[in-house]
Image: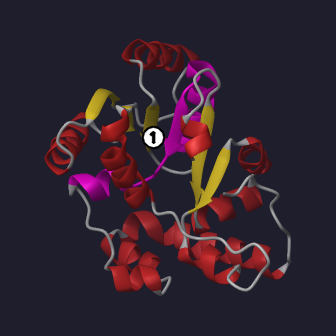
Amino acid sequence: METALSSDSQGCDVHLLELNGVAVAERERAFENLLKDAGLVLPDGRWLELLTARTSAPLHQFRGEDLLKNLCDRGRTRGLRHFFVGTTREHLQSLMEQLEKLYPGILAVGRFAPPFRDMTDGELGNLTSEISASKAHIVWIGMSTPRQDYVAQSLANSSGTVVIAVGAAFDFVSGAKHAAPQWMTRWGIEWVFRLASEPGRLWKRYLVGGFLFGRRVFRFRNIDLPLG
């Protein structure tokens, strides 16, 4: 991550991979290729950590909410400039207010609430121009997988900055949604809390996604990703 942040000219797309992301990569070759070509892929899922605990290269979980808070906090001493893309205008306003309350002096230099559909090339071009004009060091993407990941890849390539896709982290930090208790995260059952909170939206993700994730694990098909 330090290497990515030190880059002045070349963009770097950072993706947090969890159970659903592995499931999407299992059924969509384009998404698997995106992850293979990514600047950095971080495991955001307790199961990925547990499954590799006794291997020669164990992984450690990076939760999107924690990564966002950590870099917003530590970035104040380095003058890091942050741009936020995702959710709605109202939720972005709540996110800005919460971040400024938690980390006085944070440099939040821009925000954009995207349409609830795939963005057009023209919209991505306009957003790239906004990001360049803001001179942001980090662009945070808070959307769903895999839509956020394609946007992150596109913006990193076009804007030459670090773009980090963090999923629902915006909602957790702003207070729009409640995060699971830490003990559930430690035991790898955070998904139970999220499913109970939003059953109508998430049941298919965890039912189908869990099956595809398990199939990939038990078939021993490794994804060659730049995991860090």
Quadrant in which residue 225 is drawn: bottom right
Please say whether residue 159 is one of the residues in the magenta stretch: yes
Q: Is residue 102 above or below residue 58?
A: above
Residue at image coords 67%, 63% = 22
Could you tell whether 48 is left or right of 104 in the image? Answer: right
Q: Is residue 36 above or below residue 192?
A: above
Task: Name which residue lies at 21% across and 39% down.
Answer: 96
Residue 43 seen by the camera = yes
- Where is residue 65 shown, x and y percent of the image? 38, 58
Q: Is residue 191 above or below residue 151?
A: below
Q: How is the image coloured?
A: secondary structure
Residue 10 position, x and y percent, is 65, 25
Q: Nearer the viewer, residue 73 or 123?
A: 73
What are the residue bounds of the magenta stretch?
A: 148-174
Q: Is residue 164 left or right of residue 116?
A: right
Quadrant of the snapshot with the C terminus: bottom right
Task: Report x, y in % for residue 93.
Answer: 19, 37
Please give the count of numbered marks on the rendered protein.
Answer: 1
When the figure is inspected, residue 56 is found, relative to residue 15, above or below; the finding is below
Residue 211 inside the magenta-drawn segment: no
Neighbours of disc 1 within 10 Å: few (<14), some (14-19), many (20+): many
| Residue plotted at (59% across, 49% down) | 15
Query: In the image, what residue type sits under mark 1?
Result: Ile
Residue 150 visible in the shown view: no
Residue at 62 percent across and 20 percent down: it is 9
Q: Which residue is mark 1?
A: 141
| Magenta span main SS | helix
Closer to us: 75 or 87: 75
Q: Secondary structure at mark 1?
A: strand
In depth, the one of 152 and 102 nearer the eye is 102
Q: Position of residue 182 (x, y in %)?
A: 35, 80
